[in-house]
Image: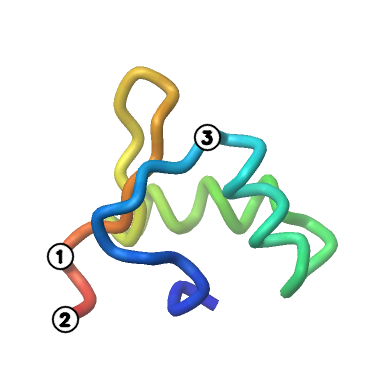
Amino acid sequence: MWKAFKKGKKYTEKEVNLISADFHDDFCTIRRDMVAEGILERKDGVYTITDILK
């Protein structure tokens, strides 16, 4: 699922939710888990994909 995000692009929470919802109904948990696992970074309400998955 993380491949649906483009490296370097900035996403709003709504955009992350919409992308995640394509893969699972519980998109809020998916978003939180991606942040917790270091796949997404959140700063000032803006999400970006991290370098953890090269």
> Viewer-proximal residue, 40 or 18?
18
Q: How many marks?
A: 3
Q: Position of residue 46 (x, y in %)?
A: 40, 31
Q: Does 31 sit left or right of 49 as displayed? A: right
Pinpoint residue 6: horizontal percent, then vertical percent: 37, 65
Identified at 34% across, 51% down, the residue is: 9
Q: Which numbered disc covers residue 51?
A: 1
Which residue, as the protein is rendered here, is positioned at the far right? Answer: 25
Mark 3 to mark 1 CA distance (whole Å): 19 Å
Q: Earlier in the sequence, mark 3 or mark 1?
A: 3
**Residue under numbered circle 3:** 12
Q: How is the image coloured?
A: rainbow
Label 2 neighbour load within 10 Å: few <14, some 14-19, many 20+: few
Amino acid type of the residue that numbered disc 1 sits on in the rendered structure: Asp
Mark 3 or 1, which is nearer the eye? 3
Q: CA distance from mark 2 to mark 3?
A: 22 Å
Which one is earlier in the sequence, the residue at label 2 or at label 3? 3
CA gap between label 1 and label 2 equals 6 Å
Residue that appears at 39% across and 48% down: 35
Rendered position, 44 above or below 17: above
Tell me if residue 9 comes above or below residue 46 in the rendering.
below
The circle drawn on residue 19 is none
CB under 8 Å between discs 1 and 2: yes
Q: Give the residue at mark 2.
A: 54
Dot 3: element: strand
Q: Are marks 3 and 1 in contact (CB under 8 Å)?
A: no
Q: Residue at coordinates 68% horizontally, 46% vertically from top-left?
A: 28
